Amino acid sequence: MSKLILFPNPKSRDYYLYSRYNYYSLDITNYKTLFEFYRTTIDKFFKNFSIKNNVSRLEESTAIINIYEALIEFTNKNKDSIISKQNKNYELAANIYNFIEEITFAKIIIGKDNEDLYLNNNLEDIKKIVSIYKLNNKAKNLFDDNDIFELFINSINKKEINDFKEYEKIEIYNFESVPLRYSIFLEAINKNYNINIKAFMPYNIDKIFSNYKDFYQGINNFEYSNISDFSKTLINKNNKEDLSKYKEQIKLIAGFGINQEIDTVIDEVIKLKNSNIPLSDIALIFSDTQKYREVVARRLKECNIKFNQRRGNFIWRMPLIPVLTSIFFIIERGKEIDIDALIKLLSSPYLTNIDGINPYNIRELLYSKDFRIFKKMPLSDFLYNIENNKEHKEISNSIIKLIELLKKLMSSDTYSKIGSAYIEILKFLKIDLIFEENIEEEKYYNSVYIKKDEIFYRDNDSLASFVEIVLKLTANDNSKNKISPMDFHEALNILIKDEYLRGDNNKEISLTISNLYDARGLKAKYLFILGANNDFINRKPDTFFISNKVRESINNKYKKYVLSSQNLLSDISYALFLNIISSCYDNGIVYFSFRLKDKDGNLEIPFFYIEDLFLELGNEDFKFDTLKENGLIFRENYIPKGNNIHSEKENTISLFFYKENYEYPKDISFDKNIKNIVNLVYNKNEESVYTNPQNFISILKEDLSNIISVSKIKEIMECPIKYIYNRLFERDSIDSLIMGINRMDKGTIYHKIFENFYNKIKEKFNNNCKLKEDKFNYYKNIASETIEEYFNKKEIRIYNETDKEVMIEEINNVMNSFIKYEIDLSKNRDYIPNNFEEKINEFKVYSYNNHNIKISGRIDRIDFSYSKDNKINGIRIVDYKANVYPKELKKYLSKLTTEEIINAYLQPILYLKYAIDEYIIKPNKSDNFNIDELVEKCEVVFAIYKEADIVNKEDYIIFDNKDILLTICGYKDGDFNLNDYFDRIFKNIFEDKLIAVSGKEQCENCINYQNCEYSYKEE
């Protein structure tokens, strides 16, 4: 009989083991995460159940689709029902799925399918929809996760599962609460297998929450964990005497919006780094993953601060080691093969000695038509395709041999057997030849190493240590104990990490970022907790079908945690927060950061814990005008001074901290309300550089004297005064992008791949770029090849492999739609793509009284058409947009005035003028020319693409009236051209006149709107 110890996440398990043994325990089979323990046992149970009863698991995503179909079936027959009035979409189906989960748990807790759960009449419809869904699943022998959970708990209640009999005790650590699914599971095995389950509370939860037993429903045996005095003081927080001892270890950080809060936090991280504090001693924990994770990760990358997000994982110095440990994930559940995991192994540049395998083309080969392989497939189908491939016999034989060894590995069940099978695989991969000199091919070692340098010896030692660890595990004295290959993998990773940490030169060099849930058990000497605002613990249940009032009444009736309620979830969330700070070192430092405003500039309230802490530390209430005096950390450079990085609203709020930058009338005192201070900012009596027209003129002239971008020209034309205010309060921020890829880099990647695609088309079709519908699949293959080649060249910096994978998937989707539209475009037009991302260094667009305005920029795409004698006779400018351009433009294009056309198409029109000058007029070398003969056609196009797909034809907005375009560009006489357009604003500026342009759209988002005498007023 043994003891099982469970944790909320791998990191808390690691700290537990390391704190007790000073190294990571060899036998970790009895140290698991609760999720791991639950998932392993329920999967094993259902695997046996499905074989006996010939049924299948219904994955959650498919279950939601099935619920959606049941929803449609019900509403078609019951058109007067309340649910039929709802938007019938997958979101509603997902809500129903969550409802089924809640009802499943409630039925088990109460002990029957009680009608109390259907107090609301609206749920009668839901019951019928669920019934249709269940019947449809039953007809197909499908069980969703909720069905499986019910079966599993029933089987435990009948004592049919033998796996639990080996345990006498179960201890759980670092849980401030146990989620309902797991508490039902633990309670069932406690009752039916007589297992003593004890919860080690991370702190004295019972002293703070009277309802603490709801947090651990079904567990009645508790013990306190040992925590530091500093943690105890932070948790209790109301003892001034104790808090005063740790005053220097408690820091408060304020920010104006999430970006400023994070910037201020990273200021402090950089200070620590510059003070030689190891990054491994620092952790950043955020309350809201959606709001914080992406921005935190992006800012750390920008500041070149190394960090880890996958807190339970570990990568050793030699890149081959994680590849070798990934061997355990190639074959899943003995029946399915993960082709990408196999390719990850076989494409390693270290493994160049496997018969017939070329690491550099194995991906293309396996995914080619020759093998008919797809990402995940049944192992039997994969082997059939490999065995029957006649063209690549040597490769096939090597892969078949490897698969046989992998099957042997996954079917082994002791340290000795698993280790022996693993060693056989390592021998097959010929890792012993990695550092051997290859005399026959007259090169040293393999493609990774050219000479015996420091890296060569470091990697040699790393691989030797790795093999030694594998041998230790294989010879483990506990080899008679039954384990799974995943247990062996866990033990292997733990020993690798232990070996790594023992080395003086191998210390962790990255800080940790984490959400609250994954941070349980995390210990850091410098702990930052971000987002400590009033929404910090404001968690709400899904009340779409069951109101919070009904939830509370059911819980009160049964005196149990049956359904989630707002009060209960908020208590658990606060308990989680206290759990995080229960891991503080006695000599550690904690930084609590919070926002003083939301994204709209409205004041936000700090988390009540922060207010209480401030009161105890500062002996006064939380007041804005005393925060600075009480040691609050914030940035002081929020007041507008030229090129400032913060918005106007942020500068307004900054007056609470940095009011000495302004001279206020003597009758204004700072203990008046906030409104007075805010009004003062907007209504300053003294004329300053920011309101003086002459200063405006000089700033505008200075900007226009330099080479300027088209976007800035557009801003000035929209309204010069608005341009000045935006410039003074300019925010130097970077867009938050998926996976942290820079927006400009992302656009460049798309344009470059479009260009490379057409270059390949030219090569393969003798310069014929007119795409044909019947060759669509062939073009798709060319696109895939283009994408692969581009990313292999590593021309663009992408921070990690996940970014790269996401980007490749996105661009593949984009290319499909791109090709479809290009085929349609080719049917009616004769343009040939010529250049993408063409750079304009300097091009004059306007002159007045010795003042010249010159632009620079990049043209997304230039297409040419050609005459019979192969001269350029037409130009198309394509301007790609990453977001949707107003559809009204296309709808009313025929009704627009010339000035409105210029406003809408200014950038591509200026680029068209440049292209006509550069590629048609200059080569003509004559002052006497007929523009209509030289330019037979021209057009400007807005092409909209989003990340996942290029938008269809409706979003390709084309203006192709040659006469109007040539007139606008000044090549033909007309009533209105670019010179007339620019005169309206630029002529006045160069004559020292400042004019304002009033309009609803211009004024709506202008910083100076409230004070501008010219601002638009609704009639």
Image: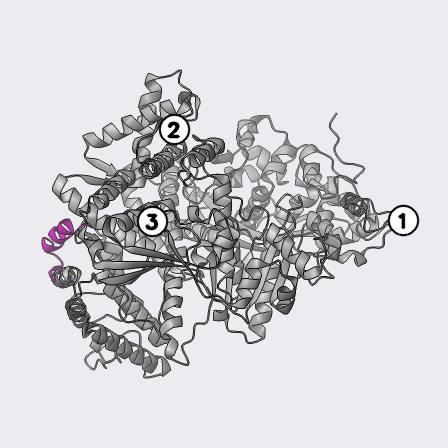
The residue that disc 3 covers is 783
In front: label 3 or label 1: 1
**Element type where label 1 sits in the image:** loop
Q: Residue at x 71, y 50 (%)?
A: 653
How are the residues colored?
one colour
Q: Mark 2 and mark 1: span between their CA atoms? A: 64 Å
The magenta segment is 373-399
Q: Considering only order in the chain, which callout, 3 or 2, is on the residue closer to the N terminus?
A: 2
Label 2 Cα neighbours within 10 Å, binned few <14 / some 14-19 / many ≥20: few
Q: Nearer the viewer, residue 460 or 448?
A: 460
Q: Quadrant of the N terminus?
A: bottom left
Amino acid type of the residue that numbered disc 1 sits on in the rendered structure? Asp
Q: Considering only order in the chain, which callout, 1 or 2, is on the residue closer to the N terminus?
A: 2
Residue 904 left/right relative to 38: right
Residue 260 left/right relative to 152: right
Amino acid type of the residue that numbered disc 2 sits on in the rendered structure? Asp
Dot label at residue 667? 1
Where in the figure is residue 214, as x and y percent of width and height?
43, 46
Label 3 Cα neighbours within 10 Å, binned few <14 / some 14-19 / many ≥20: many
Quadrant of the rendered image containing residue 320: bottom left
Q: Nearer the viewer, residue 102 or 452?
A: 102
Amino acid type of the residue that numbered disc 3 sits on in the rendered structure? Ala
Residue 208 left/right relative to 220: right
| Image position of 259 with respect to 952: above or below | below
Q: Considering only order in the chain, which callout, 1 or 3, is on the residue closer to the N terminus?
A: 1
Quadrant of the rendered image containing residue 78: top left
Dot label at residue 412? none
Asked if one can make out residue 768 in the rendered structure from this viewpoint, the answer is no
Residue 52 left/right relative to 431: left
